[in-house]
Structures are given as structure tokens and as C-alpha cells.
Image: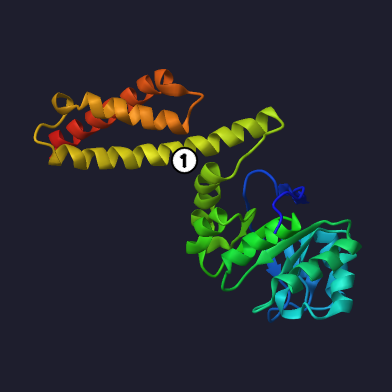
Amino acid sequence: MSTTLRRRVVSLGGLRVGDGPAVLVSGRVNLRGPGQADASAVLRDGATLVEPSRADDLPAIAAHADGVVVGAAWTRDIPLVRAVAGLGLPVVVERRPSGSLEEWLALADYCALENDDQVILCEQGRLDLGLLRAAREASGRPVVADVSQDPGLSAAAVAAGADGLLVDGSGTREAQDAVTLVGALLRPELPATLEESRQAIDRVDAALATLLERRAALAGVVQTLKPVGGFAGRDMARERALVARMAQRAPELGEARLAPIMNAVIEAGLHLSEERSART
């Protein structure tokens, strides 16, 4: 499958879903549930995404929602699909259980004809992350993963290429960590504004802080295993080799710039190790 397609970006509320940072989508309403007869009452405070149960729900959705879901449970109801796609809202097309890639993309193409190609694909239920990646590569459309049933898959979904995660309140923290930390490591970004640039830097800094904390913990273990620990036990040859390896991954920074950075990191870890030892 080609990976050279132009990436499409779909605006969903205040979020840009597609090329750029992974996003977190909450505020989904399912009108197929019990006791949801009055769509207007349910949606009066607005919602990000809404899955209708019947055509009568559509006027309220058009008035109050940011996007509409073509649910996996009724993707064969073509008249309702067509009415949903014609609302003028972004459409999130779920893959039905056991549905093929070709079937999923064909339904998305059908919706795209009705709403100026404002279509997002959604993998849900028992996530097939390989199929998620294939759908993104084959279509050029944004693909999100609904991790509401298993927030523990959030990091894997972002690593597989998900442009966003759909989540309910119980899994928000885990999903937010995934889009921030995994996204910073794996998703290339080309910010267009100062604010976008600062947000991208904040994500990288969050990942960097997490890695530095983990490195300090591992360095503390090393100090307990070395014959001579602390500053007296520093191995300068190993530190120079470490900087050289890092320069292979960061050639523009190079060894000369990386050396003082890593010296500061190593010394911070040694100071922390000494403070911990003094407390025990």
C-alpha cells in the first residue's frame, strides 16, 4: 500500500485530526443507549461526537455536535448513513466487527462524497492495530482508535499510527500520556505558528522529563552495584562512548554540544543518588 498519499486533516471541534500531533477526543454521546429518546435534551450542552439511533436524531446533532459517528452497529443502513454524511459535520466511520479493510474504506469513500471529504476512520472494540495502520496508509485519511474499553492500548495505538484516541473519563490520564509521550517520540511535527511550536516543545519536554527520571532511577541502581560509587566511581571512557553513540542519533547537535548536556544529566543523577543514600 502506498504511503505517499497527501495526508488529509479534519477539524473536529477545536482539534485538527490528521497530520501533526496525536489528539485526545472525549465527549462522545451514544443515542442508541436506553433512555435516550429526546436527542435535543441529551445534547443541549453540546458534545464532540454523537452516534444517532435514527434519522429523527439528526436535527439535534446538527445543532449541537461537532461531529457524527457512523456506528459499527448500523453501517449497512445506507439511507441513514447518507443522511448522516449530509449533515455537513465531520463523520467518524467505525469499522464493524470482522469488517474488512476494503469494506471500511468503501464506506468512508461513500461518506466523503456527501460531506466534502471530512471523514475520519475509527477502529474500535477489539483493536486491530495492523489494520488501523493499513487504513491510514491506504486512504490518507485520519484514523483514530477508540480505547474506551481498554485504555491500556493507548500507547500501542499511537505507536501504530493512530492520529487520535477516543476515550471516556476513566481512561483519560493513560490516553493523555500516550498522545503526549509516545506522540513526541514517534510523530513528526511541522508547526505553523508560535503557539503550535511551543505546544510541540512542551510534548517533547514531557517525554524528556519522563526519560530523565527513569535514567536517574537506573543510575541509582548502578551506584549500588559498582565497587566504587558516586562521583569517585565515574567512568569517563564510558561517558565519552555514551556521548558518541548519542551523537549518531543527534548528528546536528554533535558530540561537542551533547557532552556538557550529558555531564549535567550524569551529575544530577549522582547528586540524587547521594541524597537518597543519606536519607536511608
Q: Is residue 147 visible?
A: no
Give the side of residue 216 with respect to residue 224, left or right: right
For the point 26% across and 42% down, which residue is it? 218
Which x, y percent locates residue 144?
65, 59
Q: Nearer the viewer, residue 87 or 257?
A: 257
For the point 62% across and 69% down, which residue is it? 124
Q: Name the outermost residue toward the top.
A: 256
The quarter of the image holding the C terminus is: top left
From this view, report whether residue 19 is shown above or below residue 103: above
Q: Is residue 219 visible?
A: yes
For the point 63% across and 60% down, which residue is it? 133
The quarter of the image holding the N terminus is: bottom right
Where on the picture, by quarter, is residue 198? top right
Where on the picture, by quarter, is residue 126? bottom right
From this view, report whether residue 157 is shown above or below residue 32: above
The residue type indicated by label 1 comes to Ala
Q: How is the image coloured?
A: rainbow
Q: Name the outermost residue toward the left.
A: 227
Which x, y percent locates residue 219?
25, 38
* Circle 1 SS class: helix
Q: Nearer the viewer, residue 81 or 237?
A: 237
Q: Name the outermost residue toward the front.
A: 1
Q: Nearer the viewer, residue 31 or 222?
A: 222
Residue that numbered label 1 is attached to:
207
Give the side of residue 81 with respect to residue 231, left or right: right
Which x, y percent locates residue 141?
74, 56
Which x, y percent locates residue 75?
77, 77
For the point 20% across and 27% down, which residue is it? 235
Where on the picture, by quarter, is residue 130? bottom right
